[in-house]
Image (tube, rainbow, N blue to C red):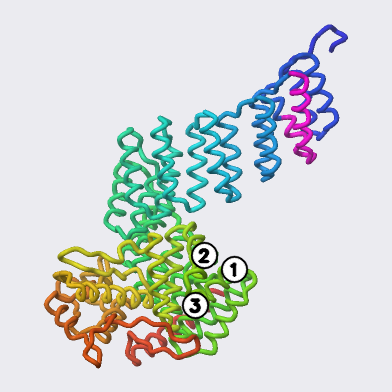
Amino acid sequence: MRHEGIQPDIITYNTLLSACANRGLGDEAEMVFRTMNEGGIVPDLTTYSYLVDTFGKLGKLDKVSELLKEMEAGGNLPDIMSYNVLLEAYSKLGLIKEAVGVFRQMQAAGCVPNAGTYSILLNLYGTYGRYDDVRELFLEMKVSNTAPDATTYNVLIQVFGEGGYFKEVVTLFHDMVEENVEPNMETYEGLIHACGKGGLHEDAKKMFLHMNQKGIVPSSKAYTGVIEAYGQAALYEEALVAFNIMNEVGSKPTVETYNSLLYTFARGGLYKESEVIMLRMGELGVLRNRDSFNAVIEGYRQGGRFEEAVKVYFEMEKERCVPDERTLEAVLSVYCVAGLVDESKEQFQEIKASGILPSVMCYCMMLAVYARSDRWDDAYQLLNEMLTNRASNIHQVLGQMIKGDFDDDSNWQMVEYVFDKLKSEGCALGMRFYNTLLEALWWLGQKERAARVLNEATKRGLFPELFRKNKLVCSVDVHRMWEGGAYVAISVWINDMYEMFLSGKDLPQIATIVVVRGKMEKSSITRDFPIAKAAYSFVQDNVSSSFSVPGWNNGRIVCQRSQLKRILLGTESTDGSKKDKLITLSNSPVGARTSQIDIRSKGDDVNYKTRMSSTRTELIPSAV
């Protein structure tokens, strides 16, 4: 070509480098690049992409860095895109040290990083959970007067949303607005998704309003995030309104949208509402997936419809849905809540046999069902298994906490650390975790410790509906709790009102325990709900028969102010002094039998077990 007097141009060199990249010819690519620079041809993005591709295949990305250094030394400063391409390559390989090396190299050469450069490195740090490095780098970006763009903020929102820093995500949005950076659809989707996961329904609503003010039509993902946020706070009507508006504006719900609604209802045991959603999915041809069935199983369990829950598990096969870890955990919860010890043990062993380490929730469920059934040897053996579990520090720490090894404030910090780590997974996991942990603590007789754990849960934003108080009503809403958690919450609530009474504060006009929400509030069968029966028996046995189910709502257990005052006036110790607490919450030595409160008569218990066992026997062959 040169013999003919034709000088190669950028296209010529890039074509040669492309051939080198396809064949992995490192030496030849290096020669072409040097010749190109010597000839005064300025490399472009395509040039650097082929170089990175060539040496990336050979595992010699450092060679690209060397070539850039040669250009720097020769006074031919590479442009920003050359460094960004190399930085992106290291980022895809997860090589943080090497990526940071390129970043510092470009700064030392006098090449100012742009928003794209910082975005690549911020995403890399975030992918590997290095959140402090993310914060430091973002601060460095601002100090260096490099203006973040929408892509930068989107990366940060995704990173902190996935890391569980939900409130920090909201702060980023406000920072974005102050910096006059225009959010795009990806921004709003990331923001609302994080708010949904973290249960920040007020913030999700504000983001939604901000979209409307900007004239942006929310996407299906944005609507799903809002529904999720409302669902985490048990705001059922608001979730349904958002879903209906979504349909009205022509934003088509996805299977994730329907699943979000299903889980919203499932957590509160609103299985009638879940049935309607499943029916609608079928009518509209929305393919139900594993999450859909998992949600329905959990909803039936919370509503005490144990047979239906087991049937759904086996129906999954017809839909070609392979059960996952959450499915197996949900089925275990059905057997445990139903009090079927042998079936629970069999399911627990099935989880182990599948090669999965049973979660802390599974261990807590088994501890509770063993304790309730006076299978203390099994309970202690399982607790010891948690304590000696080398595969999971969380199992060990919580096992020690259950035993009482971390009660003093300095050691309790280890428990708080575990709780904070679990918080990053979002409210959905948090509710399952605290429900099962409270269940285990209560039935093992660790009631004071259970009250402390409940306080930790509410501090982290779980069960926001739990305690409500004004001049007219003082309520405790336990409809999303398991039996043990409900007992703890009611005990704390009663003791708080007793403390109000002793300090001379006015009592509310009515004290209310919310045990059922949704359509079933108007049904007479509501009283058969596990939580409804458990809560009613508990206050009858431990407080007063003045607590009753009103005719106007079957999902409430109430006590009028006059009756409540009489109850509290009559609480004296045997020596005539006032008690400190109306309901004593103490920790029994681990190993001692604890008094238990059975929400069913013995006859009912036998019937439950008979029905559940026969259901399991009938359905097992169809699963083979």
Residue at position x 48%, y 53% from top? 164
Q: Residues within 10 Å of mark 2 (few under 14, many from 20)?
A: some
Of 242 and 160, the residue lying toward us: 160
**Mark 2, secondary structure of its residue:** helix
Identity of the residue furthest to the top in this view:
5
Look at the image and say whether residue 62 sits in the magenta stretch.
yes
Q: Which residue is labeled 3 in the image?
A: 402
**Magenta-colored span:** 50-75
Q: Residues within 10 Å of mark 3 (few under 14, many from 20)?
A: many
Q: Which residue is labeled 1 in the image?
A: 393
Residue 328 relative to residue 548: left or right: right
- Residue type at the position of mark 3: Ile
The N terminus lies in quadrant? top right
The C terminus lies in quadrant? bottom right
Looking at marks 3 and 1 on the same chain, the residue that comes earlier in the sequence is marked by 1
Q: Which residue is labeled 2 in the image?
A: 418
Majority secondary structure of magenta residues: helix
